[in-house]
Structures are given as C-alpha cells and as structure tokens.
Amino acid sequence: MMERNKLTNDRTVLLIAFHFPPMQGSSGLQRTLRFAQHLPDFGWRPIVLSIDERAYEKTARIRGNELPSDLQVHRAFGLNAATQLSLFGRYPRFAALPDRWATWRYWAVAKALKLIRTERISAIWSTFPIATAHRIGLELARRSDLPWIAEFRDPMWQHDWPPEPVANRVWRQLEGEIVTAADRMVFVAPSAVTMYAERFPDVATNKYVLIENGYDEETFRKAQGSLPQQPSASTSSGHPSRPIVLLHSGIIYRSERDPTHFFAAIAALKSKGLISAAALQVILRASGEESDYGNDLKRLDIADIVRLESGIDYLAAIQEMLTVDGLLLLQAANCNAQVPAKLYEYVRANRPILALTDPIGDTAATLNKLGVGTIAKLDSTAEIEAALLSFIEQIAAGSWRRPTPEDVSRCSRHAQARALAGLLDEVVGGRAKPQ
C-alpha cells in the first residue's frame, strides 16, 4: 500500500467519480485515483464517492491501481438502464437521463449528505464524462451550500451530442445549470476553456481553470525498477539492428482515433518495399476493436507488421511504454479541444512519439509546447507515409525530439494535485471571507 504524508489541516473534499478502481477499461479512473493519492500532500483529505461495483461491465484488481490504505471509498447503488433495466431492448427513459446511470443519483445524494454531516466535508468535486456525477454534485451544492468544483475531462454538450434529441436538450440545460452553480470549472485542454468562455460569455472568466492530465511518477519508478535489458534499435551506421517496435497503448475508437489512413500508409510503404516486418513491428495494445481492425489488417496484407494484442495491467502497460522504440498517438480533428491522457505518460516514458493528429488541435499544441513528437494528420495517408519514414530514421539515428526534465516534471499527477489543492483552498477561503 502507498504511504501517506500527514495532513497539515483537517479540510476534507468529497470526490464524486463514476470511473474508479476496480473498474476496468477506462483510463479516466487514473485522474481521480491520483488526485486521491496526492491531495493529502497538500493538506486535503479526500473521500471518494463512486457507484456500486455491480454497475461496471468489467472489474479487476490491477497492479498499479492500488488504493491508498487510509482512503475512504464509499459506493452508492445505481443501475445501468441499458442492461439492468432493459426488457426486450427497451428501458424507462427517466432512468437514462442524463445518461444510463441516472439512478445512481438518488442513492449517491443520500449517502453524500450523510458524509457531509459526519465527515465535515469542506468542498465537493465531481468529474464528467458521466453526466450523472455532475447532477449529483449540483444537487449537493444546492442542498449543502458547500463550494463545488465541476471538472470536465471532455467538453459536455455539443450541437450534435448527445445525438438523441431529448437527451441533447437535457444535457444542454444541465450544462447551463452547472456553469451557473459551480464555484469553479476545471478543464484538461486549453481549447475547452476557450470554448466554454465563448459559450457562456456572461460567466466570470476566473471560473474556468485549466488543470491538465499527467503521469504518476510512483508508478513509473516501480515500472523502471524491474525492466529487462533491451537491445538498441540503432547502430553506428544509423540503420536498425532489429525491427523497430512502435506501440499504441489503449482503446482506438473509429470515431475519434480512426487508424484507417495509418493502416493504408503502412500497406503503401510495404508495397513499395520501403518497410517490412523485419524492419517494423506495430503493437496495438488493447485497442478494443480487435475483430474489426483484424479484418483491415488481413485485407491490406499488413498483419505481419501490425499486431493486435490484448490488454495488460497498468504497471505492465507502463513497463511496455518504457521498453519499445516508439509510441503512437492517434487523435482526430473532432477532438481538437481534447488531449489524450496517455500523451503525458508517453512524455514521461521519454520515448519517440509519432502523433497522428490535427496540427492545429490541442494535442499537437501540447506536444510542440513540450518539444516532442513527429506530427502528421490522422486523415492523410500521404502525410503519414512521409512521417513514418522520417520517424524510423530518427529512431535509428537517435535524433528524435526530447522533452526537458523540467517540462516532464510539470506533467506529473503530483503537480496537478497541487494545482487542485490550491483551487480548493481558493474556493473554500473565498466562502469564508466576509461579504
């Protein structure tokens, strides 16, 4: 178990999050887990309120996701309407607004109000993309009059999202209520801050705060402590001595990280004799669409170069990032106001990064700010071909862009927890001041 520093005061924050261990299949749980791990270093005692584990599709006790020994985790009953309340494929609409876990709200609010009384909660924090978490935070803020920080790991309402008209209206109304009621709103990407400032021009700009995602240093140190020795992929002649291994770690969504043009670029380079399985191996780890992508690989005759591999635990995933020759990042232009959380882990791994993303989006801007990565458009086969060949040459020659130690340190989860603690101090202190 993780050791905890002694608290410097008795301030307690209630963290409301759907994604939390032992849930399996979402990298989003890292955000809440690491805040809970590091906030005590800055004088805040976290208490987590999540949903009953039976609401998760998959659970697992994963190495690297261990909870602090003294962390209180409370769970409130809630059902997935689409699976647990469905009869012949139909379920009550009220149980799925604003999302499929709407029933969680009733038991969560009751449990949270009791915690507020018994644990002397000083502030509330809730995190999206599960909209019900914010609905819980909103109701608690109104009933308890405690300061509330609403976090948006992704932007919430969009003109075309949710696609179902009734849900779209509910989300839009709920988002407006959140913006009005929350003391602060936290975003993880700069363009999201700009988006909300433009969407709600009458709201004070100091309510919008940027706290980016990050990596967990403790996990990386554990991973580095048991690394096998890897032969180098470069030689004095500048040519690879073995196949270069390129890794994408995590889910690949067709709508947001479509690998179609990446696959096409590899097929084109292979047909031209510019790459082969002896020179390049691409691992897609836990892509989540193995059967679909497997058909693509067979059709394009690149299954000897691109391998679909199953998921592994978090610590092993970090170890893999540290041992491969390059790391692959995919992010479509429709996510320009988002930055994948794995980007920061890639930066800490200090391996070359091939980023297939929109050059004007936040992902590319973050990489350029950190001075890392080779960037090409995700939807351009020709650009990817050129970038991949250049990337392989950089790896062989050892000439890829590297971050500074100072920039890496600023990306740590510990640094982000410091920022959240400062924000909590600010909103609680502001409430305490005479009006």
Image (tube, rainbow, N blue to C red):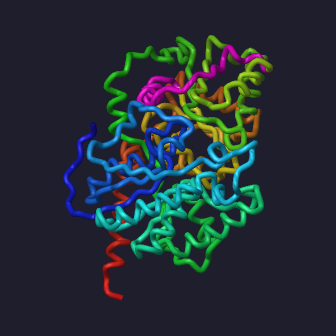
**Residue 272 appears anywhere in the view:** no
Q: Is residue 306 magenta?
A: yes
Compared to residue 387, the image places residue 13 above or below, namely below
Q: Of residues 242 and 260, which is closer to you in this image?
A: 260
The answer to whether residue 193 is left or right of residue 11 is: right
Compared to residue 337, the image places residue 243 above or below, namely above
Q: Residue furthest bottom?
A: 435
Which residue: 19% across, 53% down?
A: 6
Which residue: 78% across, 17% down?
A: 271
Which residue: 50% across, 17% down?
A: 233
Q: Quadrant of residue 291?
A: top right
Q: Of residues 40 and 302, which is closer to you in this image?
A: 40
| Residue 154 drawn at (x, y percent) | 58, 54
| Residue 302 drawn at (x, y percent) | 72, 18
The answer to whether residue 417 is left or right of residue 180 is: left
Q: Is residue 191 magenta?
A: no
Question: In which quadrant will I find the N terminus?
Answer: top left
Which residue: 63% across, 52% down?
A: 100
| Residue 435 drawn at (x, y percent) | 36, 88
Magenta residues, start to end: 300-325
The answer to whether residue 41 is left or right of residue 158 is: left
Compared to residue 28, the image places residue 337 above or below, namely below
**Residue 213 appears anywhere in the view:** yes
The answer to whether residue 333 is left or right of residue 281 is: right
Q: Of residues 21 and 225, which is closer to you in this image?
A: 21
| Residue 73 drawn at (x, y percent) | 36, 49
Counting the numbered discs, the total is 0
